[in-house]
């Protein structure tokens, strides 16, 4: 499964090379043209018939991670977070550092050596470090450069019947779905943008659409699912197994109503399950894309993902299949009639 | 004027759903402008051609108002919601709201609340009178939006209503168009923007499209003239304010001075505004493309973002006077 | 005029965010002998253009910001006291007792006052002074103040540049006048050599209030490479090793997700080639310098950040080493000398 390769690839914001190369190799025979831009966004063009609209599909390649900022005299690696990481999850996790994936772990003082009060407080970045087994600074410096990125060493694996666990489903699921779409035949022109630096503030998406001028855009994301104990149904942002989630509003976007309506219509017609993302905060690449130049009609479709931004998250494969299907059918529908201007807002 | 504002504020238009407001405004001005269009985001853009087409002036007032968005419908028909723009949960207790411009609901909080400071949107709900999820969903679906449900009242010389932020600004632009006796100096774009309350988004795309040389926003500002108010040297009824600074902009000093000079020459009362909180469409106009000379006229408002925003009619009239003088001025010192 | 004298003039000049016009003209005079063309855009950014030898017209933009943090009058109180707010990130604890200039109809000297400690109760004394409770005393009668000062007038900090031991100086607004000096020194270095690429030395406005000048100036220039020249934190007691760099051991190159990897690699290579000391400064978040705006202009610009180590940032005693500035200029000049089309084109190939 290509998602396995994508999930296990390392691509912290600004260092998306491995993911980019994987995707490029996977789609190169299926598209008409592939480009990169000055930030590292990978943009693939699949030309359709000129009378049909052009759709921009976007998913981000980068994941959250840790950047090495200093090496101590003992050879330990100090780090800072890249993107939104809950520092409380870091201690005692396995990581890989740099392009050569040097194995390491995140250490901290053992429980025996802590005062009772210390145990209640989360460890701060000043107290955490990565241990790669080196004994002194010089030894580490042979392997590690400042600025190298570390990410969780997590294997992609089936869990239960329809569920898989892995890291970086935010947003490798989106990348995988876009790749599947590119491998199909279409009548309309598709531009697939695999963006960089989403997790540090939608950087790639801020520039990616500038030269593209699509008729509409659809962002495919991984989003947090909160159907877990101690959470009320009203507070679930999304639920696993209930299909892709459509955004009604988030901190960066009010989606184009005609696009959302069309997605709902297509889902209903084809009996594809869907849900709404009930959280109205946080943002996605759509926030930057829809404000490009004079504006682009944009919507977001997200795959529910439990324990997002952590070493191990869970998704439901049925949700993934439903996401690909909804995307596919939506593109087909665009070939039929496209969007009307009714109710634009 | 009062009648126009009444229609404007009583029209439904939370951020992202400005259709009804836009149609109302379009009807008011379409015969009096040279060109009118709606862009992809939904901004309404009306052009009054100038005597000189070498420069472009953009005037912006936003059509959208703050509101609520339905995020979940309970089995027994209660609607859970989140905010659209800056809506305080305290203002919502006991408040009536209107979904989709037609469905009235009332708001209360879950269970017992010992500490009002812990009141959050997700501990509250809207009751639209439905007895089941199914019944509720016939009228309100997830993603539907609501506004306060209030009418406009006139208290002495002061207007009280929801949505004066920024329908009052829209009224100033509309009246300026209507009252202009001659062509403006330069091509002047009257832009009624969308999605200001969620991040001045409509102004981003409309400024890009117009690419103005000068941008002036007309919006509400706050005052410091109520009991124990946070310090601010702006009072209701003492004239429109000429903005110097808010969180989105440091106003071009030459434009600020031009506005001051015009106000003084024409004996229009004015106040100078340094707003510590909040931003406006001004900042977006300033930073569009290679930049614009940007400033703003504000209408002093009390209780902004509450169901009962208050402005003074004289301030409104003086705002129109000042804006009219600006668009007919020679923009001295700017270019 | 030697570099220290130039820095003294720059530091002591006034240019609070949004009000940089006069300072811009002063800097234009400094740049003028070394460039082909100077213009100002609508926001007041100073764009100095120096043509390269090549016909291919690759453009490199160096940006240092003109503006400094400051204060603004919000209210004229009974007795003629001025209440004020901040423009940019002023640390309120550093303002009490500060001498300031109020730029009213004329420039007026004043002192920032607050309720004296002996009139405060014990609880109050434990807390730092808050901006809302401070005021400026001009020593003038209320009527006089009202004639000369209006709400919205700008206030700048007063501070003469102080020469310290070694090559170090301390003063206000060295963030980022030190960077402006670095730009000037780069232009001077370039005068002695030839370069292929076109250079835009841009002194930007309104950086301290949200990198606003860089947003519009980059849009106008559309460079192939953008380098922000700013200051970073110098090491001192209480500051972590990985959050600051040493004063006097060379300029710092930022590393982080938003910095173009090939561009920073090239800068390191150039530094090694000319045996120039440099340091590395961790920048996990893209915010904080003009690079934040430069990188995402139009369809994207390869971006790097070169910083001058500086202690006590955003106070009136910011401290830098002149040597770091000179070394930074040598590095940038050498980079410009070496840049050619193939490398620039390669920055888009990932």
Image (tube, rainbow, N blue to C red):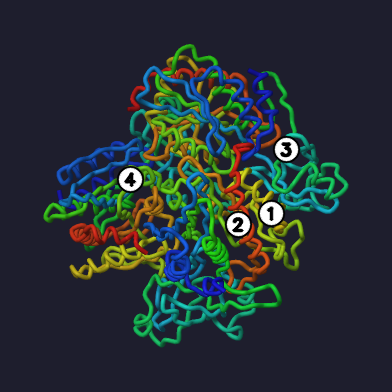
* Residue that protrudes farthest toward the left in the picture: C192
Which is more foreground, mark 2 or mark 4?
Answer: 2
The answer to whether residue C344 is visible is yes
Residue C242 sits in quarter:
bottom left
Front label number (3 vs 4): 3
Residue beneath label 1, please?
A: A267
Horizontal relation, residue A329 to residue C318: left or right:
right
Q: Secondary structure at mark 3?
A: loop
The residue that mark 3 highlights is B100
* Tag 2 subunit: A
- Marking on residue A327: 2
Report the Cα–Cα distance between label 3 and label 1: 24 Å
Inter-mark Cα distance, 2 to 1: 9 Å
Mark 1: secondary structure: helix
Tell me: residue A310, above or below residue B156. below
The quadrant of the rendering that contains the N terminus of chain B is: top right
- Give x and y (percent) for residue C298: 39, 48
In the rendered image, residue C262, in percent from the top left (x then y), is placed at 32, 65
Q: Which mark is residue C204?
A: 4
């Amino acid at each position: 499964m290509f998602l396995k390769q994508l999930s296990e690839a390392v691509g912290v914001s600004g260092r998306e090379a491995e993911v980019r190369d994987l995707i490029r190799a996977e789609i190169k025979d299926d598209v008409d043209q592939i480009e990169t831009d000055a930030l590292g966004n990978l943009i693939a063009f699949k030309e359709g018939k000129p009378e049909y609209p052009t759709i921009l599909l976007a998913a981000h390649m980068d994941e959250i991670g840790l950047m090495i900022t200093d090496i101590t005299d003992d050879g330990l690696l100090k780090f800072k977070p890249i993107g939104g990481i809950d520092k409380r999850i870091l201690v005692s996790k396995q990581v890989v550092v740099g392009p050569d994936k040097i194995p390491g772990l995140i250490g901290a003082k053992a429980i025996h050596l802590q005062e009772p009060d210390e145990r209640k407080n989360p460890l701060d970045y000043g107290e955490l470090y990565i241990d790669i087994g080196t004994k002194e600074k010089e030894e580490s410096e042979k392997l590690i450069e400042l600025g190298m990125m570390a990410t969780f060493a997590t294997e992609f694996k089936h869990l239960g019947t329809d569920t898989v666990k892995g890291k970086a489903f935010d947003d490798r699921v989106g990348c995988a779905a876009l790749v599947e779409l590119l491998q199909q035949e279409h009548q309309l022109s598709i531009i697939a943008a695999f963006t960089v630096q989403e997790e540090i503030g939608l950087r790639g998406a801020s520039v990616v659409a500038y030269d593209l001028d699509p008729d509409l855009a659809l962002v495919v994301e991984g989003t947090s699912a909160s159907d877990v104990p101690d959470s009320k149904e009203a507070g679930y942002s999304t639920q696993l197994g209930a299909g892709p989630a459509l955004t009604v509003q988030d901190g960066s976007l009010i989606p184009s109503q005609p696009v959302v309506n069309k997605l709902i219509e297509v889902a209903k017609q084809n009996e594809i399950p869907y849900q709404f993302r009930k959280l109205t905060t946080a943002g996605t690449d759509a926030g930057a894309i829809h404000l490009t130049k004079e504006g682009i009609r944009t919507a977001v479709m997200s795959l529910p993902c439990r324990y997002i931004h952590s070493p191990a998250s869970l998704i439901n494969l049925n949700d993934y299949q439903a996401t690909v299907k909804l995307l596919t059918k939506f593109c087909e529908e665009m070939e039929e009639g496209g969007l009307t201007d009714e109710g634009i807002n | 004027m009062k009648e126009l504002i009444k229609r404007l504020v009583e029209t439904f238009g939370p951020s992202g759903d400005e259709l009804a407001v836009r149609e109302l405004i379009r009807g008011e001005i379409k015969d009096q402008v040279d060109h009118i269009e709606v862009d992809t985001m939904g901004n309404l853009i009306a052009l009054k051609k100038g005597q000189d087409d070498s420069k472009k002036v953009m005037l912006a007032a936003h059509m959208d108002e703050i509101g609520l968005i339905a995020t979940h419908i309970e089995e027994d028909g209660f609607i859970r919601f989140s905010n659209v723009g800056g809506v305080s949960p305290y203002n919502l207790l006991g408040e009536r709201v209107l979904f989709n411009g037609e469905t009235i609901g009332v708001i209360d909080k879950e269970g017992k609340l010992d500490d009002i400071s812990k009141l959050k949107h997700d501990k509250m709900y809207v009751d639209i009178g439905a007895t089941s999820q199914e019944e509720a969903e016939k009228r309100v679906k997830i993603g539907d939006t609501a506004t306060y449900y209030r009418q406009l009242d006139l208290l002495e010389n002061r207007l009280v209503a929801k949505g004066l932020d920024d329908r009052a600004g829209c009224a100033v632009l509309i009246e300026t168009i209507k009252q202009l006796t001659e062509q403006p100096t330069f091509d002047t774009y009257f832009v009624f923007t969308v999605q200001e309350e969620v991040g001045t988004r409509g102004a981003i795309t409309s400024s890009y499209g117009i690419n103005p040389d000068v941008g002036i926003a007309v919006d509400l500002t706050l005052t410091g003239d109520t009991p124990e108010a946070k310090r601010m040297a702006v009072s209701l009824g003492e004239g429109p304010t000429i903005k110097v600074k808010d969180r989105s902009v440091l106003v071009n000093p030459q434009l600020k001075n031009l506005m001051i000079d015009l106000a003084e020459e024409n004996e229009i009362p004015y106040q100078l505004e340094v707003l510590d909180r909040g931003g406006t469409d001004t900042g977006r106009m300033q930073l569009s493309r290679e930049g614009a000379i940007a400033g703003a006229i504000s209408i002093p408002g009390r209780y902004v973002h509450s169901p009962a925003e208050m402005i003074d009619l004289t301030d409104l009239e003086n705002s129109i006077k000042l804006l009219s003088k600006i668009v007919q001025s020679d923009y001295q010192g700017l270019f | 005029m030697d570099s220290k004298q130039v820095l003294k003039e720059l530091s002591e000049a006034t240019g609070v965010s949004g009000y940089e016009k006069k300072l811009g003209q002063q800097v234009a005079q400094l740049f003028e002998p070394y460039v082909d063309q100077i213009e100002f855009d609508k926001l007041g950014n100073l764009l100095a253009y120096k043509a390269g030898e090549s016909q291919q017209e690759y453009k490199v933009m160096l940006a240092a910001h003109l503006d400094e943090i400051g204060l603004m009058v919000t209210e004229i109180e009974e007795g003629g006291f001025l209440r004020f707010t901040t423009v940019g990130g002023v640390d309120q604890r550093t303002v009490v007792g500060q001498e300031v200039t109020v730029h009213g109809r004329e420039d007026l000297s004043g002192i920032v006052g607050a309720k004296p400690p002996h009139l405060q109760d014990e609880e109050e004394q434990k807390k730092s002074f808050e901006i809302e409770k401070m005021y400026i005393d001009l020593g003038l009668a209320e009527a006089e103040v009202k004639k000369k000062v209006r709400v919205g007038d700008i206030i700048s900090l007063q501070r003469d540049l102080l020469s310290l031991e070694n090559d170090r100086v301390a003063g206000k607004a060295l963030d980022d006048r030190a960077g402006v000096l670095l730009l000037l020194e780069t232009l001077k270095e370039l005068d002695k050599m030839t370069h292929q690429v076109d250079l835009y030395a841009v002194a930007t406005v309104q950086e301290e209030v949200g990198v606003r000048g860089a947003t519009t100036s980059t849009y106008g220039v559309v460079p192939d490479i953008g380098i922000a020249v700013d200051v970073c934190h110098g090491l001192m007691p209480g500051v972590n090793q990985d959050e600051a760099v040493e004063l006097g051991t060379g300029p710092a190159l930022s590393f982080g997700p938003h910095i173009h990897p090939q561009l920073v690699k090239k800068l390191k290579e150039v530094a090694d080639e000319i045996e120039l000391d440099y340091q590395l400064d961790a920048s996990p978040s893209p915010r904080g310098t003009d690079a934040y705006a430069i990188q995402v202009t139009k369809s994207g610009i390869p971006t790097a950040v070169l910083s001058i180590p500086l202690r006590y940032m955003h106070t009136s005693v910011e401290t830098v080493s002149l040597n770091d500035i000179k070394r930074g200029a040598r590095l940038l000049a050498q980079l410009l000398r070496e840049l050619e089309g193939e490398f620039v084109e390669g920055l888009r190939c990932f």
